[in-house]
Amino acid sequence: MADLASIFKAYDVRGVIPDTFNADIARAIGAAFARVVGGEAVVVAHDMRPSSPELATAFSEGVTSQGLDVVFAGLGSTDLLYYGSGHLDLPGAMFTASHNPAEYNGIKMCRAGAAPISGETGLDEIRRLAEEGVPAHDGPAGTVTHRDLLSGYADYLRELVDLSGIRPLKVVVDAGNGMGGHTVPAVLEDLPLEIVPLYFELDGTFPNHPANPLDPDNLVDLQAKVRETGADIGLAFDGDADRCFVVDENGDAVPPSAVTALVAAQELEREPGATVIHNLITSLAVPEIVREKGGTPVRTRVGHSFIKATMAETGAIFGGEHSAHYYFREFWRADTGMLAAMHVLRVLGNEDRSLSRIAEAYSRYAGSGEVNSKVADAPGRMAAVREAFAGRDGVTVDELDGLTVSLPDGSWFNVRASNTEPLLRLNVEAPDEASMAGLRDEVLAIVRA
């Protein structure tokens, strides 16, 4: 098979259909995955993209060709797949390209118990086997069993966060024509919640807006509907519904770092002194609040496989990323936007204050959000940024993940290359809006030169 380097990323597979990713490649990857993870069976799910059922079926054929059985869950969110992997204690594969445009698809893979797979822990070996050709299995083929996991997933989340006793809330949910339209009704039905749905129709062509709430343009409809309906809160899910963004009653975005700090505070009340993971582009408010609540913050690289591995090493109770991925120890250390949303709903539903008032305590600095730039020479542009800042008085630089530069006035920024798109991503934070904007514009001028 052809070189698959272009579609194997740091911790998943992403490609354009059918140019770089198709059923034949999915079948080869399925056979390689079966060889690497071993065991008796694999659980497989897929999102609503037009290509997803065919790819998931081909992958399953590759798995069964190696003698392993497949538990085929069909339509599901990525966190539903993680539930299946954890609950059934099986390796898993989710067919999705998350927030990428409609022409993309991909695979998120895990070992049994939703344990992460990265380049160093099996992904490189899967790629090598798929490229070279997996030896034929000497024995009978496996079988495919179809199993509905949605009700079990919903019941489990509702066991972890009890919303039955909260005050009534009006909640606008923008599913972006993604998998949130499938999972939200199952999880949040029969609760003291009036759900106002936006774009719940499953449509992998994304006819209304891209399913990427990280882009403020894609929150506009949600914000308008919250204001129009007088809702208490708005929730936006990405395409595979493993990320959740929050807006308050005014339609203003609640930064994911503030959500991380809020959920961390709740988890530390439940388990005082616990460890909380945050990646290096979350707000400085997160480690500050974790320490104030008696917990231990641990900083790590961006990306779910790195967060999950660090959680396993430290026994952390919770982890959060600025990209709105939230990880829970009781959810097999996997990320679930739905569970994070339920934590926010519980806090809001147990207080008389508005969400904007509650969020004030967790938002201490001015942040740029993630600013993306298409560049022809990402390493060269990052080197130019480093050269511009590294020699200044009081400036510190680290390269744990991309380039993080901290200034003596408390401002900092991180520039890193995307693992899934030809972009440089910039995040800036400063004590006030003016300082943040000035630093953001200075760095962008170098990146985009």
Image: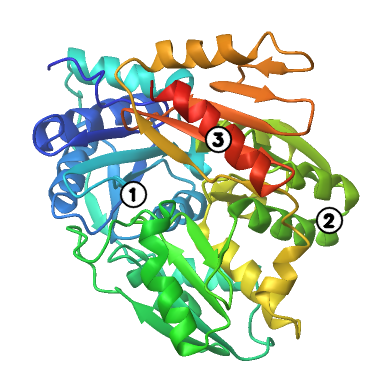
Label number found at residue 271: 2
Label number found at residue 99: 1
**Foreground disc of the pair 3, 2:** 3
Identified at 56% across, 31% down, the residue is 306
33 horizontally vs 139: left or right: right
207 horizontally vs 236: left or right: left
Res 134 seen here: no
Percent from the top left, x then y, of residue 387? 57, 9
Identified at 56% across, 67% down, the residue is 341
Q: Which image quadrant is residue 66 in?
A: top left
Identified at 49% across, 47% down, the residue is 89
Which amino acid does the dot numbered 2 rest on? Glu
Reading the chain from its start, which is encountered first: label 3 or label 2?
2
Q: Residues within 10 Å of mark 2 (few under 14, many from 20)?
A: few
User: According to the image, label 3 marks what residue?
Assistant: 440
Q: Please report contact status of discs 1 and 2: CB closer than 8 Å, yes or no.
A: no
Q: Which image quadrant is residue 178 in?
A: bottom left
